[in-house]
Amino acid sequence: MKLYAGVDGGQTATQAVVGDERGTVLGRGGGGPANHVDEPGAQERLRSAVDDAVRAALRAAGLPSATLFKGAHVALTGEVEEQRVAVVGSVVRAERLTVGHDAPAAWMGAFGGAPGVAVIAGTGSVAFGCNAAGDEVRVGGWGYLFGDRGSAFWIAAEAIRRALDSADRGRDSALGEAACRHFGVERPAQIPAAFYRRALARDTLAGFAPVVTALALQGEVAAISLVEEAGRALAELALVALERLGLRRGEVAVVGGAAVDPLLRRAMARELTLQGVTLREPLAEPVIGALWLAGGRGGGERA
């Protein structure tokens, strides 16, 4: 039996699956965050996350940790630099190992290789698509300083930014009160201070996003406005990708932790529908897309 591995290394967590040549998933495993390349210990964190996830998937499949895969694909958020490829190669044993951006794996999982655009709305955000001619386009994915609009980090940071604006005007706000409770501080101003001195990691700050979306579902006006803006920003990523691919009335799928929020999805779907574009459910999750890119394809688990 030929064995394949797919790994989806995100800013919050890492997932791995082991499968056979038919695409049947034999085992799954998880690890810690595999990004934060600009922070101390980034390479060791990447090594540990991928190693832990793959070993756990092998254990779940009843296979030895020294298993040599026929093929393996590791999808990572952020730019794939030589040093990151070397780190992955030190822990994943495969006859054919490929390491790439996480967006193509998300698209492969969502569309199984068919034309369309996948939007990742996790800690960060990016869109990736392909048309029938094989042309590929990536839009966004420029990190928390220069992009990631509509992502969990963006929702959290924007909520805190708006809370700080209210505080500057001497006004309390529901967003500010929620942020103080969530981060265990007395004033919103303490949150950016903690972030700048790296006492607050990016994935930890992004963890405030579900609190904001919950406030929106409870009817908090400022939170509703913010979440709907996030949905429109994600739709814009998809529409730009579709236009560049010549898929004027194509299909879009959205994946990632932030994408589960119903208000965000409705806002995104509404914006896409205005342009004649359909928001559809993905065939499978990104880690399965990574498995398919590794060469493990077929009629096995697709969700």
Image (cartoon, grey):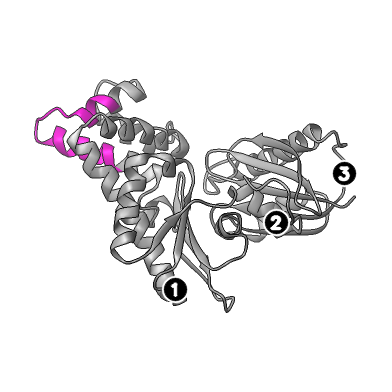
Amino acid on which the number 3 mark rests in the picture: Thr
Specify whether residue 177 is painted magenta. Answer: yes
Q: Quadrant of residue 174?
A: top left
- For the residue pair 33 and 289, the one nearer the viewer reads as 289
For the residues marked 3 and 1, what is the alpha-carbon distance in whole angstroms? 42 Å
One can see residue 197 in this view: no
**Magenta region's main secondary structure?**
helix
Q: Quadrant of residue 31?
A: top right
Q: Residue furthest right?
A: 1
- Badge 2: how crowded within 10 Å, few (<14), some, or many (20+)? many
Specify whether residue 3 is painted magenta. Answer: no
Q: Quadrant of residue 202?
A: top left
| Among numbered discs 2 and 3, the one appearing first in the sequence | 3
For the residues marked 2 and 3, what is the alpha-carbon distance in whole angstroms? 19 Å
Locate residue 5 relative to residue 117 in the image: left or right: right
Amino acid on which the number 2 mark rests in the picture: Trp
| Among numbered discs 2 and 1, the one appearing first in the sequence | 1
Q: Position of residue 124 (x, y in %)?
A: 45, 49
- First to last magenta residue range: 158-178
Q: Position of residue 26 (x, y in %)?
A: 78, 40
**Dot 3: what SS?**
loop
Locate residue 28 relative to residue 76 in the image: left or right: right
Report the mark closest to the observer, 3 or 1: 1
One can see residue 47 in this view: yes
Residue 63 vertical position relative to residue 80 in the rendered view, above or below:
above
Q: Which residue is mark 1?
A: 247
Q: Which residue is mark 2?
A: 292
| Among numbered discs 3 and 1, the one appearing first in the sequence | 3
Report the mark closest to the observer, 2 or 3: 2
- For the residue pair 165 and 265, the one nearer the viewer reads as 265
Q: Which mark is residue 67?
A: 3
